Amino acid sequence: MTDANRSALRHWLSDVRDSRDSALVAGTDPCGVRWQRHAQGVLELTPADAPTDAPDVGDARDATDTSVGRHRPRFDAILSCGIHGDETAPIEIVDAILHDIADGRLTLRERVLVVLGNPDAVRAGKRYLECDLNRLFQGAHAKRAESPAVQRARELEVIVAQFFAGTNGARRLRRHVDMHTAIRASLFPRFAVVPGTPQHPPSDDWIDTLAAADIEAIMLTEQPSVTFSYHTCARFGAESCTLELGKVAPFGQNRLENFAGIDAALRRWLSGAEMGARDDGKTLRAQRFRVAAEIVRRTDAFVLDVPANTPNFTPFAAGTVLARDGENTYTVSHPQERIVFPNPDVANGLRAGVMVVPVVPVVPVVPVVPDA
Ligand code: ZN
């Protein structure tokens, strides 16, 4: 097969695993989807029936107008995985979706940037090589010594900026789903970290959409961060999330039925339907948490008083001393706090755990009508 009619979608993952660099940087897949390869593992896909000639104008609300027989994408969508190289299940989910688009079993209707984050780490089967890619975004790469991971973070930031800018000024919705799996157990096996800023707080719709994808808990955070999803939210106003979808396993050993909820949701979204509209019609709610505190390791004397294998979202009662650092201690001050991402072995100055508390739903104030 010549490169010209070789399916870029079907070879997205195998090209990365084989370190195969094609000479072609753009083309049309046999299924009709137009693609551009911006870097290794990074494909921009444009639906086969998206308008090409006229500049995209108009409002996202009438983006589904198909009166001219053409579907106008509503979203500029980023779907990323493999930011950590050993988290293979999300990579397999995306690979299967791309195969189904290539084979005509799924019709792509949104403009999407598919990102396999760290090809070097994927080939090595490791979380990362020299440093954690998901600590290098939002410009953090500029403060680090040059390395392949630093170059990759910089490259991905440039591609993302071009992708969001490249729609001829159309006001489309921006969404970024960054998929991970975890080594640690979790009392909520599937949860999302949803970033927000004062300018771009996460909407209730976005949280309910994630709940419909079987995400059981949402950790809302407005702390400035250096993760990929914080970057797309803070810099581009995207509705973003980092998804933790269950346990790490090597390629071929993932139980993909454990990921059915997010897989179905992604397929609904990319094919132009509502991501949150479940086939079974169920309305699911996720438990919402907000960050109450971060436990930061300050000195070599730091001790985190929770076992290293403590599951995410393990609760602790008020008064429990969780960490000691010389004269300072961290004591649970809310009636209950849950720990997420505990890690006593971080370097001084870094976060050894995040404490979260439930978001109390705001009860609407009902005016009291006096009895007549
Ligand atoms: Zn990860």
Image (cartoon, helix red, strand yellow):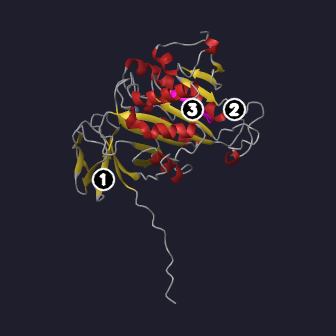
Label 3 secondary element: loop
Secondary structure category for the residue under label 2: loop
Kind of residue at disc 1: Glu
Say which residue label 3 marks: 106
In the image as oriented, which residue stretches furthest toward the bottom?
A: 372
Splitting the image into 4 quarters, where does residue 104 fall? top right
Q: Is residue 288 magenta?
A: no
Mark 3 neighbour density, 10 Å: few (under 14) some (14–19) many (20 or more): some
Q: How far apart are marks 2 and 3 (CA)?
A: 13 Å
CB at mark 1 closer than 8 A to ligand 1?
no
* Residue 319: image location, x then y, percent: 23, 56
Q: Residue furthest top?
A: 2
Q: Does the magenta stretch include residue 109?
A: yes
Residue picked out by circle 2: 49
Residue behind mark 1:
337
User: Of the residues under marks 2 and 3, which one precedes in the sequence?
Assistant: 2
Of 203 and 237, the residue lying toward us: 203
Is residue 94 rendered to the left or right of residue 341? Answer: right
Front position among marks 1 and 3: 3
Query: Which range of residues does the magenta coloring cover?
Result: 105-115
At a point 25% along the width and 41% down the height, the residue shown is 310
Identity, as a three-letter code, of the amino acid under mark 3: Leu
Residue 77, percent across and down? 58, 36
Residue drawn at (41%, 48%) of the image: 219
> Residue at coordinates 57% horizontally, 28% vertically from top-left?
101
Task: Decide if residue 350 is in sight here.
Answer: yes
Q: Is residue 61 left or right of residue 303?
A: right
- Image quadrant in which the N terminus is located: top right
For the residues carrying marks 2 and 3, which lies nearer the camera in this image? 3
Which mark is in front, 2 or 1? 2
Q: Earlier in the sequence, mark 1 or mark 3?
A: 3
